[in-house]
Image (cartoon, rainbow, N blue to C red):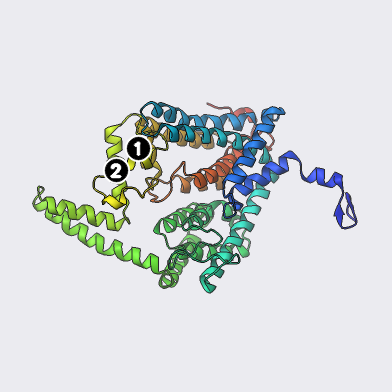
Amino acid sequence: MRAGFRGPWPSPAALRQAFTLANVCRLFALLLVAWQPFPGEYRVPLVGSALLGLALSLRGGLPTVAEPARRLGLLLLCLVIPGLLSIPTSLAPGKSWGEIASVALVALAGISVLYGLRTRADHQWLQTGLVVVIAAWIGDGLLQAITGADVFGITPKAEGMINGPFSTNGIFGIIVAVLTPLVLWEPLKQRNRWAIALTGGLVVTVILSGQRNNLLLLVLGLMALSTLWSKRTRLIGAAALIAAVVAIYPLAPTLQQRAGWMSTSATDMATSLQRLQDNPADTEASQHLFDSLNRFTSDRAFLIDAGLKMIHDRPLTGVGINAFRPAYPLYAQLAPHGHRSKPSHAHNIYLEVTAETGLIGLAGLLLAIGLGWRWFLVASAERQALAAPYAATLFVMLFPLTTHTVLLAAFYFTLLLMVLGGYLSALFSPEIALIANPAEESEA
């Protein structure tokens, strides 16, 4: 009989040992991803983590994560200060204040994540948990693709676009794709044979999710992972990815449709550009070019046009943090009338940040990215190795050419919190053993 157990049931002492505050914080860090398909979605683990962060602050647990928490606070201030500056001229002050409050909630939740990821073993536990969760989601999505329903009876919301255990379309493919580096980094690094099967399942699942944006995220994640491989393995991996896309493509009708739009629209755009080159005043060709671009991007041109107009109208502070949706009808003159009330976000991180909080907000975001990169560069080799899978995932999440994600979108910002917490903990947690002298890692 194992110590701490009497018969088949754990003793109260064993339960107390299992449910320490650190273990619960680490569990909620995993739930920031794992609970998203279930009732309450991201709200349950986010609020739970925030309450844990508040409890840690009140009970004096903050000093144990003081350094990574300070760095997290600095990065969040890069977003909050421009958001506060945008409120006096916001087109939706109530929504803007609500967004500021949500960032404060994220800050508290971040303390919990940092407290749960203080040691190397904590990071191993989280990454193993993510492997289990994503593998289960992949299996669920493949079952849905084969039978038409997943284990919960959830069916695809659009033809050829599986959504796994999620009741809404789109989120499933995004999460699986953006977490590719974090999920596969250690299994591939350790050359586990089952990691090849997991990689194959992930590729097939993302293709069947039916969104070009997800394919881009997947390719970015695999590019980040390729730093672990030899040149020969990279070539084999690239060939395997191309073969998988070609093989699965016929089973993804939505992806086929959108690829068809891209092909015909590209031809139309070339024709319109030639006409404009011959006659710059040709308004019909100009409109045809915009319409072709809009088809190419699945109505994203309306969003880009409206976002650029917001930036032109209010270049410094924008239309207000979290005010893109209420502002959109005022700036979407090129969009059909029925389309003006539909979009909820700009479908691009950098466009939305700049439209909502102006050039000050864009500068704040770029400053945060620059600080995060600098902290990585000046860290010891051991800390860099531990932070690398998180850094690769942040690269995917913040890539500027993605066409669906938004930084402050609730489910996406929650993912970002978990990844960023792991990244900062890997770089600054005092409980992670160092090869180099800790004094050498002091901030410049």
Kind of residue sitting beneath label 1: Ala
The crowding category of the residue bearing disc 1, from other C-alpha atoms within 10 Å (few below 14, some 14 to 19, many at least 20), is many
Badge 2 vs badge 1, beta-carbon distance below 8 Å: yes
Badge 2 marks a residue whose secondary structure is helix
Quadrant position of residue 54: top right
Using residue 313 as the reference point, say whether residue 210 is left or right of it: right
> Can you say whether 156 is above or below 332 in the image?
below
- Give how far across and how far down residue 82 sits, in percent: 42, 29
Instruction: Residue 295: give x, y in percent of width and height.
Output: 28, 58
Instruction: State left or right for residue 268 relative to residue 67.
Output: left
The residue at which mark 1 appears reads as: 355
Which residue type does callout 2 highlight? Ala
Which residue sits at x=51%, y=64%?
Answer: 205
Q: How many numbered badges does the structure rendering display?
A: 2
The answer to whether residue 260 is left or right of residue 215 is left
Nearest to the observer: residue 327 or residue 362: 327
Q: Can residue 190 be seen in this view?
A: no
**Residue 303 sits above or below residue 288 on the image:** above
Q: Provide residue 382's location: percent of width, then percent of height.
A: 62, 41
Q: Could you say whether the residue bearing mark 1 is in a helix, strand or loop? A: helix
Q: Looking at the image, is 170 positioned above or below residue 201?
A: above
- The CA distance from mark 2 to mark 1 is 9 Å
Q: Residue 310 carries which label?
A: none
Tell me, for residue 306, which label it has, or none.
2
Looking at the picture, does residue 111 appear above or below residue 138?
Answer: above
